[in-house]
Image: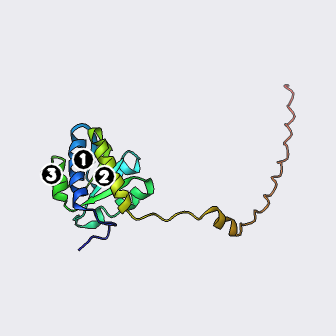
Amino acid sequence: MAKSYVKFEVSNDIVAKTYEALQQARQNGTIRKGANEVTKSVERGLASFVVIAGDVDPEEVVVHIPSLCEQKKITYSYVPSKQELGKSIGMNVPCTAIAVENPGSAANAIKDIVSKVTGLAPKPAQAPSPEKAAEQPKKEAKPKAEKKAAPKKEAAPEKAAE
């Protein structure tokens, strides 16, 4: 059964290339591991590519990451196994998500993956065109109330020293 956060299917050849690119990025680039670290990296705008495991349970752990990536215009992809995702970066434990901050020698491989994944990803809703925006009635601006100048206070007369 597909998880609710998986928005598109990724082919096996892209998955294999993703694992290889992550191995290279780990060796001489910068990556962040785990849902919390990935979320921070995306929110700060440091991530250039995000990979999410497709078998995360409970899925609430990573369900926010795809929409956050779309909001920040960061490309993301899926792999079927969190166990394999962890192994690809040299961990002995499963990993739910990975953010690549500096691809290092994997830059070309990641560019190739990104170009293939962007064709699979659903297109975000676009803003209305200028013609449609012109058709909509604009709200009339209300005139701003003028500020009244506060009355000037007169200086109290000084008492003569006695």
- Percent from the top left, x then y, of residue 133? 65, 65
- Distance CA(mark 3)–CA(mark 1): 13 Å
Residue type at tag 1:
Ala
As drawn, 63 above or below 158: below
Q: Position of residue 46 (x, y in %)?
A: 38, 44
Going 64% across and 67% down the picture, which residue do you hit? 132
| Secondary element type, mark 2 | helix
In the visual, does 57 lie left or right of 46?
left
Residue at image position (27%, 42%) is: 106
Of the pair 123 and 154, the residue shown nearer to us: 123
What numbered label is drawn on residue 87? 3
Whether the residues at callouts 1 and 2 have beta carbons within 8 Å, the answer is: yes
Gap between marks 1 and 2 measured at Cα: 9 Å
Going by the numbered disc 3, the residue's amino acid type is: Lys
Residue 113: give its label.
2
Q: CA distance from mark 3 to mark 2?
A: 19 Å
Judged left or right of residue 99, residue 142 is right
Q: Tell me the crowding category of disc 1: few under 14, some 14 to 19, or many 20 or more residues within 10 angstroms, Cα based.
A: many
Q: Earlier in the sequence, mark 1 or mark 2?
A: 1
Which image quadrant for residue 116?
bottom left
Q: Residues within 10 Å of mark 3 (few under 14, many from 20)?
A: some
Number of marks: 3
What number is the disc on residue 21?
Answer: 1
Seen in the image, is 159 located left or right of residue 51? right
> Where residue 87 appears, x then y in whole percent?
15, 51
Instruction: Looking at the image, tell me whether mark 3 or mark 1 is earlier in sequence order.
Output: 1
Rendered position, 88 above or below 104: below
Q: Earlier in the sequence, mark 3 or mark 2?
A: 3
Q: Amino acid at mark 2?
A: Ile
Residue 152 in the image: state x and y as whole percent: 85, 43
- Farthest residue toward the top? 162
